[in-house]
Image (cartoon, rainbow, N blue to C red):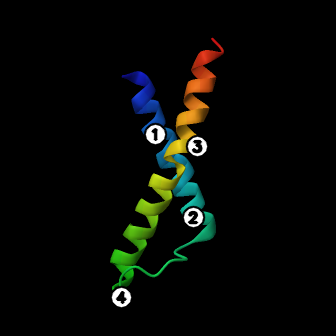
Amino acid sequence: MAAIVLTFIGSLFLGGGLWFVVGSRFRFSPDDEQNERLNFALFFVGTLPVSFVLVFFGLGDT
């Protein structure tokens, strides 16, 4: 259970940092606020596999 929570928290930080650096590159909605939310959600979901690998290889070392 802790690994799942760490995966989501890691993805939150990685996706948020990526969204902060890259910005809202994709146009999903004409509404700017909704578009920013959808871009953040895309970055969050996109970084889930990376975070998953980082957590499980990190936990496997100990």
Q: Which mark is residue 20?
A: 2
The type of residue carrying mark 1 is Ile
| Residue that protrudes farthest toward the right in the picture | 61
Residue 31 x/y as whole percent: 33, 85
Left or right, 10 with reference to 1: right
Give the foreground label among 4 and 1. Answer: 4
| Mark 3 residue crowding within 10 angstroms, few (<14) / some (14–19) / many (20+) | some
Q: Please report the residue visible at 58 percent of the width from the left and 56 percent of the height from the top.
A: 17
Give the foreground label among 2 and 4. Answer: 4
Q: Quadrant of residue 35?
A: bottom left
Q: CA distance from mark 3 to mark 2?
A: 18 Å
Residue 28 x/y as whole percent: 40, 79
Q: CA distance from mark 3 to mark 1?
A: 12 Å
Q: Which mark is residue 30?
A: 4
Give the foreground label among 3 and 1. Answer: 3
Considering the numbered disc 4 on the image, is that residue within a helix, a strand or a loop? loop
Q: Quadrant of residue 23?
A: bottom right
Which residue is tagged 3? 50
Give the foreground label among 3 and 4. Answer: 3
Which residue is tagged 1? 9
| Mark 1 residue crowding within 10 angstroms, few (<14) / some (14–19) / many (20+) | some
Which one is nearer the viewer's eye here, 55 or 13? Answer: 55
Q: Earlier in the sequence, mark 4 or mark 1?
A: 1
